[in-house]
Image (cartoon, rainbow, N blue to C red):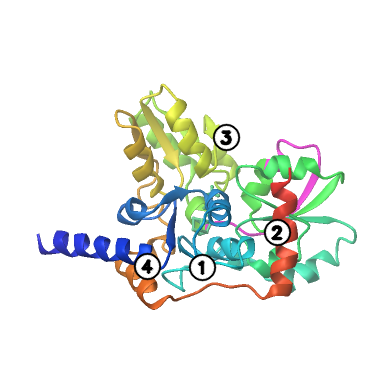
Amino acid sequence: MRRIMTDIVMRERIARLKAERRAVILAHNYQIGPVQDIADFVGDSLELSRKAAAIEAETVVFCGVHFMAETAAILCPDKTVLLPDAGAGCPMADMITAEELRRWKTRYPGRKVVCYVNTSAEVKAESDICCTSANALQVVESLPDDEVLFVPDKNLAAFVARRSRKKIVAWDGYCYVHHHIHPADILSGKKAHPDAEVWAHPECRPEVLDLADKVLSTGQMVQEALRTDRREILIATETGIAHRLRKENPGKDFLPVKENALCANMKKITLPKVLSSMEKMKPRVSVPEDIRRRALGAIERMIRL
Ligand code: 13P
Ligand code: SF4
């Protein structure tokens, strides 16, 4: 009972600060339920950044991981962007640095670089165009070149390569949460739920995607959940998304194929940290102007498609 009261008080204080700070709270689809529930918008990485840019607010409280808050800071430099836990990074984004990318590019003169949105601002600044899990194929196909470089996710790159005639040279990065979902997890899910459809995120390994009925980004899962008549869906992605899918689709069952497919960094954001960041107006995320402008170029080229 005491804990429930504490949560209620916390939510009230957050609501008060939201008005005082002219703040908007954005939460990624993988955030814990209580954080999703206090957010003004819940969405995928790009939806949230675009929302941050479009909305009238002075402060954006970004409940997600660092590259997402950074993308918001790139798109709206006039707003204060808060990341309630400064240590909430993305291990996959950290698998390539700008220096590594600069060195890699020298081995492929003239090749264009497509960077996944899960990258640092510095890496985006070294890239020609950005992509998300929802539009990676479209972005690659939009380039006139027959061969492109793709960073950092080798699984997303493989997903695109199988659908494109272009040669994709991929960096050896991956998301540990999705990479640790194996074909055996899908097969045992199917055995237990033979009528279920299987949806997988394109960050999963190719052998897992081969067993899926649909390959969808988190934003596409949310849309497909509203559309589908299927009652049982096995999901191969971070389990946090099940909170939103279940909330928006009562009567449909969303079953994670791997209960421990958890992104430890996404889970670092909690209600007390959201409250504290709004009280102290930190930790802030900002990007030096020269890097911001170059990174913005890669993002805008994608948005224009
Ligand atoms: P989405 O862009 O599909 O939300 O994915 C972001 C992410 O980090 C997936 O692991
Ligand atoms: Fe990064 Fe994977 Fe976590 Fe997404 S789920 S933020 S790709 S570590």
Q: Are marks 1 and 4 in contact (CB under 8 Å)?
A: no
Query: Which amino acid lies under the numbered mark 2 shown in the image of this protein?
Result: Trp
Residue that appears at 82% across and 55% down: 112
**Which numbered disc, 1 or 3, marks the residue that appears first in the sequence?**
1
Front residue (pair 218, 288): 288
Query: Which amino acid lies under the numbered mark 4 shown in the image of this protein?
Result: Glu
Task: State whether residue 21 is above or below residue 129.
Answer: below
The residue labelled by disc 2 is: 171
The residue labelled by disc 3 is: 210
The residues tagged by marks 1 and 2 sit, at their Cα atoms, a distance apart of: 30 Å
Nearest to the eye among marks 1 and 4: give it: 4
Nearest to the eye among marks 3 and 4: give it: 4
Q: Position of residue 302 (x, y in %)?
A: 71, 49
Residue that appears at 42% across and 75% down: 281
Task: State whether residue 103 is above or below residue 19.
Answer: below
Q: Position of residue 2 (x, y in %)?
A: 11, 64
